[in-house]
Image (tube, rainbow, N blue to C red):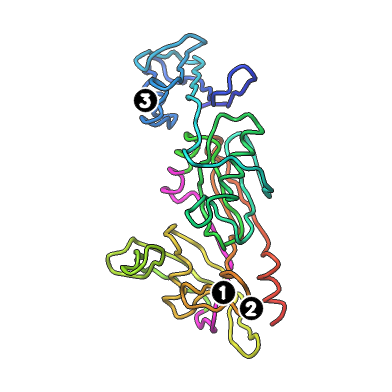
Amino acid sequence: MNHSLLMNNMDTRYTLRFTAHKEGQLLREALGEWRISKRALTAIKFEGGLLTVNGIERNVRHPLQIGDCVEVKFPPEEKSEGLVVEYGELTIVYEDEAIIVLDKPAHQSTIPSREHPTKSIANYICGYFEQQALASTVHIVTRLDRDTSGLLCIAKHAHIHHLTGLAQRGGDVSREYEAIVHGHVVEACQSIVAPIGRKDTSIIEREVRNDGQFAHTDVFVKRRFYIQEEPMTHIRLKLHTGRTHQIRVHMAYLGHPLVGDELYGGTRQLIDRQALHCVSLSMQHPLTREVLHFTSSLHEDMQQLINNS
């Protein structure tokens, strides 16, 4: 399969180009092999997209010849209703025609909420896309809690989001975190496999419960230390699933809540947020299948905790 992405000043629709490699194959079958979803095909047909073969509009029943040039023009996207376009600072680690990887600060939401309706990453990405004249909306691939810092990935188009979703389900998106927790974690490395669900008495808080969703976290001790005679542990964690508050819930379940995480039993005497940072993100590029790897250093507030020990 050969493919490329086309963008030009005359047509802002997201466009992919493929080269047919099977004689007589129906366009519909080729599009499936190229991972164009049925939902996307419906949108192309009814919402202003276009399928062409060698520059001529065709329907999905068209038989292809080897070497045919197939262009898939996706309909323009509209941002979610209520998502305000704002302009603010974004720390971009990587960007190409398909994805953006950011280093998110603490105290900034990934998406707007009732409590924090503006100044989120999503708001700023909307403004950034507008400045670039991209007919796209925000598609969060890897989300972080408001007070968690570090790497997160955003897809520039719904089709790219679809491809990254396939990659996540196939285990081809890997995230690692570092955290500081209360107490000395005894085991140097361990796996926590414990289902997580919403707590009955809260719309926000999660807990380990038998009827929860499968959740798997690996924990590795980096260093045990004391601050003001209180034992703490600097740990590294690898997520195998992506449940809401997964690391925070699993560490509290172990009896070692994150420092600063008042929701799950931590204290904010030394830091004003949960001490959690996404330090590593590895993924297959959704178009090229190239393996990408990004890293981020701990932010100053967490580094200061470790240095003061």
Mark 1: secondary structure: loop
The span shown in magenta is: 165-187
Q: Looking at numbered disc 2 in the image, what kind of residue is underneath it?
A: Leu
Q: List the residue tagged with mark 1.
A: 260
Label 3 to label 1: alpha-carbon separation: 47 Å
Q: List the residue tagged with mark 3.
A: 42
Does residue 10 appear left or right of residue 246 in this picture? right
Label 1 to label 2: alpha-carbon separation: 7 Å
Q: Looking at numbered disc 3 in the image, what kind of residue is underneath it?
A: Thr
Q: Earlier in the sequence, mark 3 or mark 1?
A: 3
Q: List the residue tagged with mark 2.
A: 270
Screen quadrant of the C terminus: bottom right
Q: Earlier in the sequence, mark 3 or mark 2?
A: 3
Taking the spot 63% from the left edge, 91% from the top edge, the residue there is 229
**Residue 89 vs residue 6, the one in the foreground:** 89
Q: Nearer the viewer, mark 3 or mark 1?
A: 1
**Residue 160 vs residue 21, the one in the foreground:** 160
Mark 3: secondary structure: helix
Q: Nearer the viewer, mark 3 or mark 2?
A: 2
